[in-house]
Image (cartoon, rainbow, N blue to C red):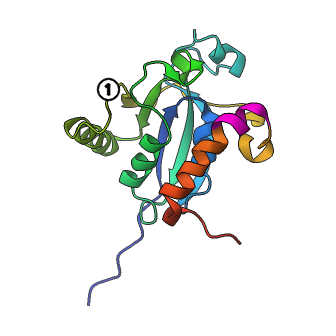
Amino acid sequence: MSAPALPALPQRITLAGGCFWCLDAAFRPLRGVLRVECGYSNGHTPQPSYAQVCTGKTGHAEVIRLDFDPDVLPLSTVLDVFFAVHDPTTPDRQGNDIGPQYRSGIYTHGSEQLAAVQAYVQALRDRHAFAAPIVTEIAPETNYAPAELEHQDYFARHPYQGYCAAVIAPKLDKLRKQYASLLRRPA
């Protein structure tokens, strides 16, 4: 008799897809998400502030660091959602958010994850999943710093703020329709 399979260890991936408030709001309601933290990654300034990152001069992207249970939410599904909620074809831009801090990026944790992400994105390119070329940066996470407390879970605390109502809410409506089966059940 063989021993039962052990559950997979939680995984971490860092995602950049425009304003981190959007990605934070998109991933928090998904089953299998263990933790979401807004932050700044892959720039050259140590421990930058929001004001510094907003200048576009630190090299950092606004990101979420996502911890997830791959038995519930596989990496491929994380990437499906990521590519559904932002435009990976616009360099340094998402809608009216313009600058290198709003670039599309996937920052990995480990060589196995890096290879899996590269293969996933290459498959999107091979099947011409988008009308324009994918410009998503793929690299190991470096020089990460958590964002200030006021940026964590921003949409849930400010759903009627102008940006949240005009930009984030429509993305979440689309996500709820397209990925209803991934949403947590109400308590």
> Helix, strand or loop at disc 1?
loop
**Pointer 1 local density, CA inside 10 Å: few below 14, some 14–19, many at least 20:** few
Q: Position of residue 40 (x, y in %)?
A: 59, 27
From the viewer's perspective, is residue 1 above or below residue 158? Answer: below
* Outermost bottom residue: 1
128 relative position to 106: left or right: left
Q: Residue visible at 63% across and 46% down?
A: 25
Main SS of the magenta part reads helix
Q: Residue visible at 52% across and 62% down?
A: 180
Q: Position of residue 92 (x, y in %)?
A: 48, 18
Q: Residue visible at 76% across and 32% down?
A: 162
What is the three-letter code of the residue carrying label 1? Ala
Q: Is residue 142 visible?
A: yes
User: Is residue 165 rendered magenta in the image?
Assistant: yes
Q: Quadrant of the C terminus?
A: bottom right
Identify which residue, 88 or 41, lies in the foreground: 88
Identify which residue, 43 or 157, lies in the foreground: 157
Q: Quadrant of residue 34?
A: bottom right
From the viewer's perspective, is residue 81 above or below residue 111? Answer: below
Q: Quadrant of residue 161?
A: top right
Q: Is residue 27 visible?
A: no
User: Is residue 134 rendered magenta in the image?
Assistant: no
Q: Quadrant of the N terminus?
A: bottom left
Highlighted magenta segment, given as a residue range? 161-167
Q: Position of residue 114 (x, y in %)?
A: 32, 39
96 relative position to 91: left or right: right
Q: Quadrant of residue 112?
A: top left
**Residue occupied by mark 1:** 132
73 relative position to 123: left or right: right
Q: Residue visible at 36% across and 52% down?
A: 76
Q: Position of residue 123 (x, y in %)?
A: 23, 42
